[in-house]
Amino acid sequence: MMMNLVDKLLSKTTMYRLTLYYLASLLAVAILFSLFGILPFSPLYIILITFFLLISSWIVNNVFAKVFEAHSNVESVFITALILALIITPANPFKNIAFLAWVAIWASASKYIFAINKKHLFNPAAFAVVLTSLTIGQSASWWVGNLPMLPFVLIGGLLLVRKIRRFNLIWGFLITVAVTTLGFSIMEGLNLVTQGQRLLFYSPLLFFAFVMLTEPLTAPSTKKLQIIYGMLVGFLFVPQIHLGSFYFTPEIALLLGNVFSYLSKIRET
């Protein structure tokens, strides 16, 4: 009965609108927690950064939409801006204006420049922070991944995944992350409980899974490929995975998963 009620409520809103509400709620909670000292951030900085990313993303998106003569989904624009606000450290925005502008520009630009049949290939937020990391040495801290925010990330995330029916993708990702982390912890002689707590309570694991990984346009369309996609990104998500001196970050793991997703869609056609 309870799930029927939940599904009925979820059916009354679109996926984009639900995601927008979810992200906005997380930022509202973060501002409140920062105000009372539960989170070590300035509530004013969170507000200013969020406002700047929303406005700049909207402006840049409109410019690219006109240049490419493409339809613009304003909810998608705001979703990307709110994701960026939740993963970029809310430090003094006046000292980081170039970084904030850069990620806003490239998050919007990637939807048009790296797109086929008017569908973007890469997760815009992930693409933007990878590019800024490579060019100006500034990237995402994924600050939303902390213990006080965890219950809100979890509850809203479960509702979102329930709406889009992507639990198979989530489980493929989470199980792979858990098994891979367990394997490395055993080989390196690390405390398993400590590593598990760090992964669950102090990392972007759940936010990344619920919000970034499940984006419909950059994920495979079939359940089997979704599981493989989740497993691939999950393996690369683990911090110990590296190629020589190059270590993967969550956003790089996602972009490589996006490439796999695109290639799988080509094979299906």
Image (cartoon, rainbow, N blue to C red):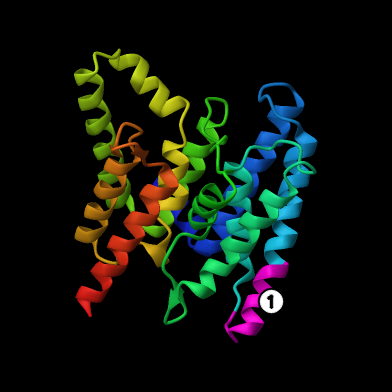
The residue under the point 27% across, 41% down is: 235
Q: Which residue lies furthest to the bottom in this view?
A: 69
Q: Quadrant of residue 92?
A: top right
Position in image of residue 38 (x %, y %): 67, 22
Q: As displayed, is residue 111 above or below residue 2?
A: below
Q: Tell how many labels.
A: 1
Q: Does the magenta stretch include residue 60?
A: yes
The residue under the point 34% across, 36% down is: 245
The residue under the point 57% across, 26% down is: 148
Q: As displayed, is residue 61 above or below residue 240?
A: below
Q: Is residue 174 magenta?
A: no
Residue 230 placement, left or right of 150: left
Q: As displayed, is residue 110 above or below residue 161?
A: below
Question: Dot 1, how many residues are within 10 Å of its Cα: few (below 14), some (14-19), or many (20+)?
Answer: some
Position in image of residue 172 (x %, y %): 25, 46
- The range drawn in magenta is 59-71
Q: Is the magenta stretch mostly helix, strand or loop?
A: helix
The residue under the point 46% across, 59% down is: 123
- The residue labelled by disc 1 is 63
Query: At label 1, which amino acid type do we have?
Result: Val
Residue 216 placement, left or right of 106: left
Element class at badge 1 = helix
Position in image of residue 76 (x %, y %): 57, 65
Q: In this rendering, does residue 208 appear at all?
A: yes
